[in-house]
Amino acid sequence: MNTFEMPRTVVITGGSAGVGRAAARAFARAGADVALIARGQGRLEEARREIEQIGRRCMTCSADVADARAVDDAADRIEQDLGPIDCWVNNAMASVFAPVSEVTADEFRRVTEVTYLGIVHGTKAALRHMLPRDRGMIIQVGSALAYRGIPLQAAYCASKHAIVGFTESLRTELLHDGRHIHVTMVHLPAMNTPQFEWVRSRLDHKAQPVPPIFAPEVAARAIVWSSQHRRRQLLVGFPTFKTVWGNRLAPGLADRILARSGYSSQQTGEPEDPERADNLCSPVEGDFAAHGRFGDRERPRSFWTPLSRHPAMATAAAAALVLLISAAIWLAMA
């Protein structure tokens, strides 16, 4: 079987803002009850009210995904109050915008604990409840940067790369054991979320997502779709597809392009306030929901993503990209 029923109970980490909040709304509209795990209790309560207004049950758990015991405790409470967890979405993340030489050891550790180990802790908490039932879906929210590192985000890129290795190892173990628990990855392009308002940054100018920028609902729709289909991974948006396959085919060329454009493409023309609060170690207060401040530039839909759901079309597109990149390299060397 390549499809699953719509999950009845869904857990989303990092569910109080950004992609997580948009996904919570999308799951609720599709008929699921939702449990949200995040640190900021105020935003969790705002998200809960949104879900209940849609007409579904919502439970909130204030926890730091870097704390394995806190995530386990949250999973136990969710199972008790909402019922068996059918789908677990690992979405929480953290980052630091700065060159490697300016990122401290503690900052590397913290980003890794949230972005990588947070997914490990969430996955293990989900498995603890799913394995005895031998059913369930685990969705890892990844990124184009899980396959291609870019300047100024080394800690984040490294953590996303680690998630791929972890997920591939887990998938082989589940297949070996003949388990009916599916693990998938949904890799995203640049999203208009509030993270650029609160991410820790040492850049001269305010951080921005690398254009083109997509609305968080684009990611939310892809996550809900993935919860009902047996796919190894889903590349959301043509920029993600282009980044992943371009790096596979011509990584040296990607190095040079990013060395030239990677700094400017991640910054606006507005100066950064070096004294502003960031959320690396504690939540930032403020009226943040799913969308960030790039609404005038966001794309509300991705025409590529529906095509990427069909493996044959995605393969044909990859072959076409191989030819284009090969031709570009040949012309450059001619």
Image (tube, grey):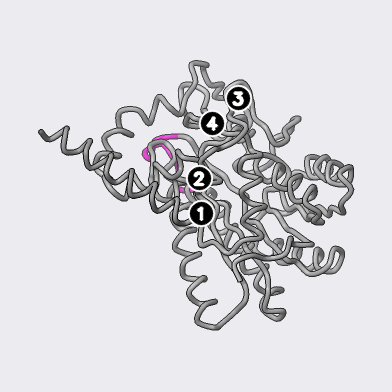
Question: Which residue lies under the disc numbered 1?
Answer: 310
At label 4, counting other C-alpha atoms closer than 10 Å, the crowd grade (few under 14, some 14-19, many 20 or more) is many
* Circle 3/circle 4 CB separation < 8 Å: yes
- Residue at the location (72% across, 43% down)? 21
Which disc number belongs to residue 73?
Answer: none
Question: Which residue lies under the disc numbered 4?
Answer: 213
**Disc 4 or disc 2, which is closer to the eye?**
4
Cα distance between the residues tagged 1 and 2: 39 Å
- Residue at the location (61% across, 59% down)? 139
Which disc number belongs to residue 107?
Answer: 2
Quick one: quadrant of the C terminus? top left
Q: Magenta-highlighted stretch: main secondary structure?
A: helix
Cα distance between the residues tagged 3 and 2: 26 Å
Q: Secondary structure at mark 4?
A: strand
Image: magenta residue range: 98-107
Residue type, label 2: Glu
Q: Is residue 287 left or right of residue 259?
A: right
Q: Is residue 206 above or below residue 241?
A: above
Q: Is residue 100 left or right of residue 24?
A: left
Which disc number belongs to residue 294?
Answer: 3
**Is 303 a magenta residue?**
no
Residue type, label 1: His
Q: Secondary structure at mark 3?
A: loop
Spot occupied by residue 44 in the image (x, y as percentages of width and height): 79, 45
Residue type, label 4: Ile
**Disc 4 or disc 1, which is closer to the eye?**
1
- Residue at the location (87% across, 54% down)? 57
Cα distance between the residues tagged 1 and 3: 30 Å
